[in-house]
Image (cartoon, rainbow, N blue to C red):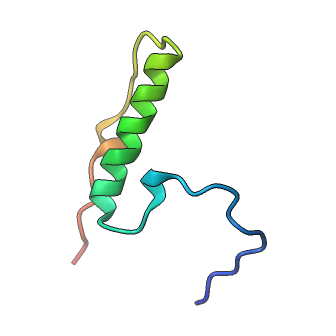
Amino acid sequence: MARICLAPVSFERPWQAAGDALEMAKRKADVAFEFFYKLNVPYYCFHDVDVSPRRRRR
């Protein structure tokens, strides 16, 4: 099914570049933690299922 884009992309971010999905996710996490640091966020809580890659089903 074709993807329909109703509006042009307003800003291309480096962590949204095409490539390996796992590498893009790592880059996105690095950017997020840099942002948390700048906001002086004291801690980050997550569930392992939120950050681990999904395994393929047979």
| Placement of 11 over or under 55, stated as above or below | above
Q: Which of 16 and 43 is in front in this view?
A: 16
The image position of residue 24, as x and y in percent, is 35, 55
**Count of numbered circles on the image:** 0
In the picture as drawn, the residue positioned furthest to the bottom comes out as: 1
Residue 10 to residue 56: above or below: above
Q: In this view, does 12 lie to the left or right of 48?
A: right
**In the visual, does 18 lie left or right of 9?**
left
Near-viewer residue (23 or 51): 23
Q: Where is residue 47 in the image (x, y as percent from the top left)?
A: 35, 34
Identify the residue shown where x is 67% and y is 64%: 9
Does residue 3 appear to the left or right of 44 in the view shown? right
The extreme right residue here reads 6
Q: In which quarter of the image is the C terminus?
A: bottom left
Q: Image point 62% across, 81% down: which residue?
A: 3
Residue 55's x, y, as percent? 23, 63
For image coordinates 78% across by 73% down, the residue present is 6
Please provide percent x and percent y for residue 27: 35, 46
Answer above or below: position of 24 versus 47.
below
In the rendered view of the protein, which quadrant contains the N terminus? bottom right
User: Which quarter of the picture shows residue 30?
Assistant: top left
